[in-house]
Amino acid sequence: MPLRFTIRQLEYLVAVAEAGSIAGAADRVNVSSPSISAAISQLEADFGHQ
């Protein structure tokens, strides 16, 4: 089964890695923290890891 994710989810993942926090990532990409958190949660579910 192929993995499915969006460029936006990857952008948010990179932003979290660079900023070191979800709040910092949200500031970088100008979206809410819950939006970042939801995107990361979906990636975790898709990959089966946290």
Image: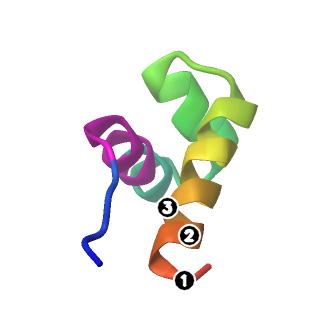
Q: Residue at x 64, y 58 (%)?
A: 41
Which disc, if any, is residue 44? 2
Q: Tell me: 16 left or right of 24.
A: left
- Location of the N terminus by quadrant is bottom left
Q: Residue at x 25, y 72 (%)?
A: 2
Asked which secondary structure carries label 2, the reply is helix
- Location of the C terminus by quadrant is bottom right
**Amino acid type, residue under disc 3 in the picture:** Leu
Label 2 to label 3: alpha-carbon separation: 4 Å
| Mark 2: few/some/many CA within 10 Å (<14, 14-19, 20+) | few
Whether label 2 touches label 3, CB < 8 Å? yes
Q: Which residues are magenta?
A: 6-14
**Amino acid type, residue under disc 2 in the picture:** Glu
Which disc, if any, is residue 43? 3
Asked which secondary structure carries label 1, the reply is loop
Q: Position of residue 49 (x, y in %)?
A: 56, 83
Q: Quadrant of residue 7?
A: top left
Label 1 to label 2: alpha-carbon separation: 6 Å
Whether label 1 touches label 2, CB < 8 Å? yes
